[in-house]
Image (spheres, coloured by chain):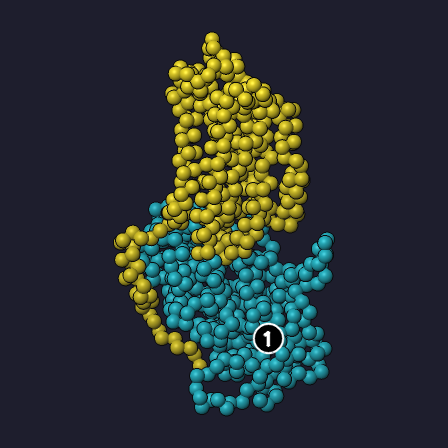
Chain colours: A cyan, B yellow
Amino acid sequence: MPLSEQEKPLLQVKNLKKYYPIKKGVISRTVGYVKAVDDVSFDIYPGETVGLVGESGCGKSTTGRSLVRLEDPTAGQVIFQGKDLAKISNKEMRKLRTELQIIFQDPYSSLNPRKRIGDLLAEPLIAHKLATRSEADKKVNEILEIVGLSKQYKNRYPHEFSGGQRQRIGIARALMLHPKLIICDEPVSALDVSIQAQVLNLLKDLQKELKLTYVFIAHGLGAVKYISDRICVMYLGRVMEFATTKEIFEHPLHPYTEILLNAYPIPNPHMRDRKQIVVEGDVPSPANPPKGCVFHTRCPFAKDICKEKIPTLTGKGHTVACHFPLESVNV
Amino acid sequence: MAMNLNPNKNVPETEGLKSSEQILLQLGEEESYLHMVMRRFLKHKLAVAGLIVFGLIILIAALAPVISPHDPNKIFGEFEAAPSATHILGTDPVGRDVMSRLIYGAQVSIAVGIGAVAIYVALGIVLGLVAGYFGKWVDMLIMRLTDIFMSFPYFMVILVLVSIIGPSLFNITFVIGLLGWPAIARLVRGSVLSIKEMDYVKAGVALGYSTPKILFQHILPNALAPILVNATFGVASAIIMEASLSFLGMGVRPPAASWGNMLTQAESITVLSSQPWLWIPPGLMILLAVLSINFIGDGLRDAIESQNAK
């Protein structure tokens, strides 16, 4: 989605950090920190979908959860409707929660097994005193229809549903409060490929109808490419590159982005001999990240400066954190 | 390079399972959790027998004024009389009807058993939920408190407390209830620690539910199974505790009847050897009550635990 300059961001993330203390010994003193998210900043505009991609453990889920304050950030700001979500009181936050929702990865643990679907979906409205029991019931019927489930299912328990159906119930629950922003935390990675497409299409249709804004977290590029307007590539808790989907796929600037794209298999035997940069080694521990650019230990183009200086995120529209963006080194 | 994203626009109709599920729905084969537990419990023969026996004991306790042949405290002319037509189980050394006292004794056992357990389960649940959910120093404080409570010899503390505040039905219920919570609190805390990491609890937070709502409506129902089993066994031990205290004269005060204080008469060797109607019936009743509850507990545990795989 093209961003007009005058549009105001819906949500701003400024220098977000989340460190988890590592505790040891009988008196559990802190011996270090796992830097799950380290100095992440980005803006999200109304109506767009921002994809957050990266390997496991790169901090994308932690970032997503910080946006709805399921994690308390160590430092930094998350600004939504002029308020810093990291600072406001629980009471104020509770009111804002109607605007921010989250869809979880595992549809098997995201629904309370002791609650019927109808109660599960009506609960948010009743808890926020937005509807009476009978009004809520009507809304539940509507929402079930929207996500493509029969309203007969209201009296059933979660264990009676398949993964795809459960995920749709999870989506329905997130929609009950009419949020503006929904964090989708790998909503399709636990589902079969055929069901993935259904859920992705459902999310897309809902976005159009209800004017939703998504933060879509995933490790598979296929789903992200399909749904995102802009993509944010993360590595070891830091943003490596942030650009529109087209730019990321056609002109990746960061070597890591290039490697991620290459790692995605192309079902075309004639492409077998294409030139590829292959990454070596493992992701370093976030408890002891490399000095300088966090990617230098695995980067095929790393020079001395990469080991010393942390590259800043630069560029307009298409931002990248690299001392030697790919266009300057001929690939 | 995209995965095969067939624009499956008609999402609603496509899960294929729908028609068969609808048939199932019509057949009414969907089974709630409660039904499943009940079905498994009913397969457990001893547990069902236990339930029947315990049900009868409760019935006896409830209907005591109606079914008891005499006033339990009325003194008849003949004392230590052997069983006869008027006194089915004979009379005690004071001349009261043993059968009537046995029936009224059931009231005491049931009251103490269920009352005490209700008190300590409530305490244990609240403390366990709070400790497990909030963690950090709250958890630390509550868990160390349970350690302290558990390191005292339980029976001695109850004996001392009862002797301080005075023996009575209410006091022993209260004291047993006050001291029984640590086991429940630990059990609940353990379950909470794993349940609070589940996404449905996180979803509750994200949806802006209040903390008590999350604790009691989302976490507790999922932690209830082991508590229920533990509480059932707890009723049996509370009944034994009451009987022991009454036997030692620290429980229900005579002239009120309790199975425990009826057994006191068995202290005398003559009663033991030649007047079995004075001590066999109350002893048997205690045995029956405790055994039936333990069978119920066993059945409940099997019924609940075998479904956890789901």
| Residue at which label 1 appears | A240
State the image coordinates of residue A74 (x, y, percent, origin top left): 64, 60
In the displayed structure, would residue A32 be above or below residue A5?
A: above
Residue B91 in sight here: yes
State the image coordinates of residue A87 (x, y, percent, origin top left): 60, 55
Few, some or many C-alpha atoms within 10 Å of disc 1 (few <14, some 14-19, many ≥20)?
many
Seen at 47% across and 19% down, the residue is B98
State the image coordinates of residue A95 (x, y, percent, origin top left): 50, 51
Chain letter of mark 1 equals A
| Residue placed furthest toward the top | B77
In the displayed structure, would residue A331 be above or below residue A314?
A: below
**Quadrant of the rendering where the C terminus of chain B is positioned:** bottom left
Seen at 31% across and 66% down, the residue is B16
Seen at 52% across and 80% down, the residue is A263
Of B118 and B127, the residue lying toward us: B118
Task: Give the SS element for disc 1.
Answer: strand
**Quadrant of the rendering where the N terminus of chain B is positioned:** bottom left
State the image coordinates of residue B56 (x, y, percent, origin top left): 40, 31
